[in-house]
């Protein structure tokens, strides 16, 4: 018989074994220490917790309601330990453990209307302007471009979390990439404010 605790990870409630709780808490403290010099540490930690909550949600089923130490160890293998960052061998092993598949999302950061072209561009690895031109040609040439765009706008979900934005680009969703993505977003915001002041 084990003692279980109720925890809140990124707004979601989970029941967790006490040994799994201590391992997860220790892991999150190591990550916080690793990113402690970053100005964006709270945002990085929030995005990491969101990803951990998504992975914990995958572990819960109708017959399994409690997160175990094995579940936490699997999540840590996916996310990576702070001391592994920058080690290409360990990064390669982690990417073999869980392959990242690209997913189509609407890109809210690169949109003119709904982000469909930005999302398709990120998914295909091409400039969204090319996708926009294709839609314009289809619209004026065949008349179906607007209809196709609206249908895609309705059925393709928007990339809201950092994990979804990384999946859209085809990057592995791990601690290192989440931290890099948050830093990149802050730099873009800072640069846009500098550009507006000039």
Image (cartoon, rainbow, N blue to C red):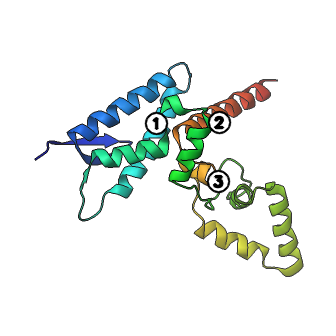
Q: Foreground: 145 or 126?
A: 126
Residue 139 image point, x, y percent: 83, 74
Q: Earlier in the sequence, mark 1 or mark 2?
A: 1
- Disc 2 secondary structure class: helix
Q: Would you say residue 11 is visible in this rendering?
A: no
Q: Residue furthest left?
A: 1
Indicate left or right for 107 with 22 as reference: right
Residue at 82% across, 23% down: 198
Tag shown at residue 46: 1
Front position in the image: 190 or 101: 101
Q: CA distance from mark 3 to mark 2?
A: 17 Å
Give how far apart the Cα atoms at labels 3 and 1 are: 21 Å
Which circle's residue, 3 or 2, is located before the other in the chain? Answer: 3
**In the image, is residue 130 above or below residue 135?**
above
Residue 197 is left or right of residue 159, and the answer is right
Q: Is residue 131 left or right of residue 75?
A: right
Residue ID at (48%, 42%): 79
Residue 106 percent coordinates (x, y): 64, 58
Q: Which mark is residue 170?
A: 3
Q: Is residue 195 above or below residue 71?
A: above
Residue assigned mark 2: 185
Residue ID at (60%, 49%) = 165
Tell me which numbered mark, 3 or 1, is placed earlier along the sequence. Answer: 1
Q: Quick check: 158 above or below 192?
A: below
């Amino acid at each position: 018989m084990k003692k279980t605790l109720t925890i809140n990870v990124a707004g979601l409630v989970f029941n967790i074994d006490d040994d799994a709780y201590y391992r997860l808490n220790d892991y999150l403290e190591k990550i916080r220490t690793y990113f402690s010099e970053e100005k964006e540490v709270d945002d990085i930690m929030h995005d990491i917790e969101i990803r951990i909550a998504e992975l914990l949600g995958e572990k819960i089923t109708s017959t399994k309601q409690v997160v175990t130490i094995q579940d936490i160890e699997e999540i840590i293998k996916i996310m990576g330990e702070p001391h592994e960052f920058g080690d290409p061998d360990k990064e390669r092993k982690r990417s073999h453990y869980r392959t990242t598949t690209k997913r189509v999302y609407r890109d809210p950061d690169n949109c003119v209307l709904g982000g469909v072209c930005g999302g398709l561009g990120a998914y295909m690895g091409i400039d969204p302007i090319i996708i926009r031109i294709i839609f314009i040609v289809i619209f004026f040439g065949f008349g179906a471009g607007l209809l196709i765009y609206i249908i895609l706008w309705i059925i393709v979900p928007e990339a809201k979390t950092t994990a979804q934005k990384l999946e859209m680009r085809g990057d592995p969703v791990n601690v290192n990439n989440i931290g890099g993505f948050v830093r990149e977003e802050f730099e873009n915001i800072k640069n846009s404010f500098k550009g507006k002041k000039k």
